[in-house]
Amino acid sequence: MLEKIDTTLSLTEKEYWRRIGEAQLRLHLLQREMYQSGKCSALVMLEGWDAAGKGGAIKRITETLDPRGFEVVAFAAPKGDDRTHHYLWRFWKHVPTRGRMVVFDRSHYGRVLVERVEGFCSEEEWRRAYREINEWEGHLLSGGCQVIKFWLHISQEEQLRRFRSRERDPYRQYKLTEEDWRNRARWKEYEEAVEQMLQRTSTPLAPWTVVEADDKSWARVKIVETIVDRLEDVLGKAKLPGVDGGKGRKAKKGRKGKKG
């Protein structure tokens, strides 16, 4: 499955700024409608390879949103109280109430990824987790929470290029750890775990979106546009200023500056 993904899909800079600008405006309007109507909430989850661009994507999701209506939660290995509870407990605590959006940087899918590959849970536990996760997400959906999941997929060559770039940059070296190199050495094992995760936990109402992420512009646009599409299914089309029917708007002039 993953080997068939064309990670080289890309956008020109002009097309990037046009599409990201429109998608962010739509998302801003949808967030406002979601908050005012209380029709639903949104839980957005980003998983992906190390250095796949999750942080940059989260910035593009949230940079035009009202900060009163969203939260970003980054998860690492469980510690303290989290280790004494069921593994889903620490994620339950951050499920959004109606009208709000929460973005997970990493998520409960660590159970069937890193915990599986590194042996932090038993085979029985990670195999059982597929059913537990599907049932949990089903409960969220039945309560009006839209579950929107992304896997950011990059090639091994692109990951190595990004690792080397971080090594050379003193301001970004902190982003590269020994654990990143160790995970890279186990690429095949993680790839198998990812394949099974996508197959076993992609459901009609909570499907996975695989994002071709070698080009950061393409990845960011695809992610924001997908969130917009999912929310418009529930809230209706975002009505953009000066455009009949909210179907689109004229391309804005390209903004200057880097996309990084």
Image (cartoon, rainbow, N blue to C red):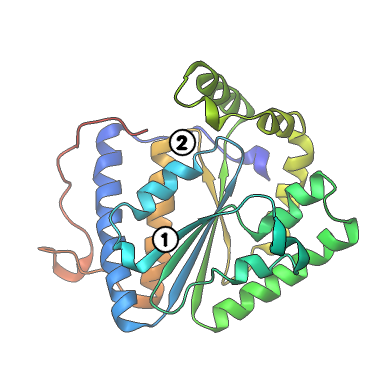
Q: Quadrant of the C terminus?
A: top left
Judged left or right of residue 126, residue 68 is: left
Q: Identify the residue position indicated by label 1 in the image.
A: 227
Q: Is residue 101 left or right of residue 2?
A: left
Mark 2 lies on a secondary structure that is loop
* Amino acid under disc 2: Leu
Q: Nearer the viewer, mark 2 or mark 1?
A: 1
Compare residues 83 and 185 and report the one nearer the observer. 83
Residue 139 image-quadrant placement: bottom right
Which is more toward the observer, 233 or 90? Answer: 90
Check disc 2: other Cα within 10 Å, few if <14, some if 14-19, many if 20+.
some
Are dots 2 and 1 in contact, CB under 8 Å?
no
Q: Which residue is mark 2?
A: 9
Query: In the image, residue 248 lies at what x, y percent?
Result: 22, 59
Question: Splitting the image into 4 quarters, where does residue 241 fall?
Answer: bottom left
Question: Which label is found at residue 152?
Answer: none
- Give the residue drawn at x 46%, y 64%: 102
Q: Residue furthest left?
A: 242
Q: Secondary structure at mark 1?
A: helix
The residue nearer to you, when weighing 136 against 83, is: 83
The amino acid at mark 1 is Ile
* Image side of residue 57 versus residue 121, left or right: left
Q: Quadrant of the N terminus?
A: top right
Badge 2 or badge 1: first in the primary sequence: 2
